[in-house]
Image (spheres, rainbow, N blue to C red):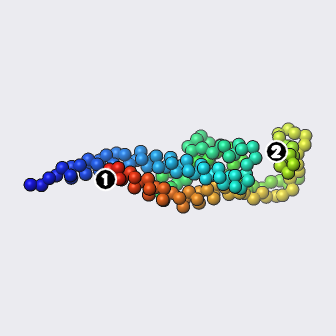
Amino acid sequence: MIDVSEIEAFIKNCRAAAADVKPYAGKVLEQAGEEFLDIVQGKIQSARNVDTGRLLASFTKGGAGNIWKLNLGGLTLTIGTNIEYARYVNDGHSQQPGRFVPGVWNGSHFQYVPGARTGMVLKASFVKGSHFFDRSVQVLERMFPELADKAFEQFFQRYF
């Protein structure tokens, strides 16, 4: 006589795992997104892109107006900011030499103030980007396989 109860339990676990794998993958992606936001904020700080903190605090996952999409092994995560100047800080940008920018100087730090009578005249024609986002993506791409492996190992241990 053959005891098929173990096979039936295995099939039941397979069905349960199949139903849970997509929501679980979403949670893993969510976790990667949280980790990525921490990495981005760290890269912004290490690149000394912090002025008012507006850019630093603006990064979110999946928000309206986000400007970057990450593809992680077929899973897509939209992360970014709706701050209009984020790309310029990351990629660098051309500027018009001789253009007046209104604002005030606080020591060696310039703060843009629209409509101010004081300010500065631009000299350089190109401002290098800090590539904070690009560097963050590289860090996440190195980390994600291990993060996903650990997460799915826990997932499968739950069922098998």
Q: What crowding class fits label 1: few (fewer than 14 Cα within 10 Å), some (14-19), or many (20 or more)?
A: few
Residue 64 placement (x, y as % from top left): 59, 40
Q: Residue at x 52, y 51 (%)?
A: 32
Image side of residue 127 versus residue 76, left or right: right
Q: What residue did someone put label 2 on? A: 111
**Amino acid, disc 1:** Phe
Residue 159 placement (x, y as % from top left): 32, 50
Q: What crowding class fits label 2: few (fewer than 14 Cα within 10 Å), some (14-19), or many (20 or more)?
A: some
Q: Residue at x 48, y 56 (%)?
A: 147
Residue placed most toward the observer, 143 or 89: 143
Residue 53 placement (x, y as % from top left): 71, 44
Residue 143 placement (x, y as % from top left): 53, 58
**Amino acid, disc 2:** Gln
Secondary structure at badge 2 equals strand
Q: Residue at x 38, y 51 (%)?
A: 155
Q: What residue did someone put label 1 on? A: 160
Query: Total number of numbered labels?
Result: 2
Estimate the spatial distance between the alpha carbons at disc 1 and disc 2, rounded to whole Å. Answer: 59 Å
Residue placed most toward the observer, 49 or 1: 1
Q: Residue at x 57, y 51 (%)?
A: 36
Q: Quadrant of the N terminus?
A: bottom left
Secondary structure at badge 1 equals loop
User: Which residue sits furthest left?
Assistant: 1
The numbered dot on residue 107 is none
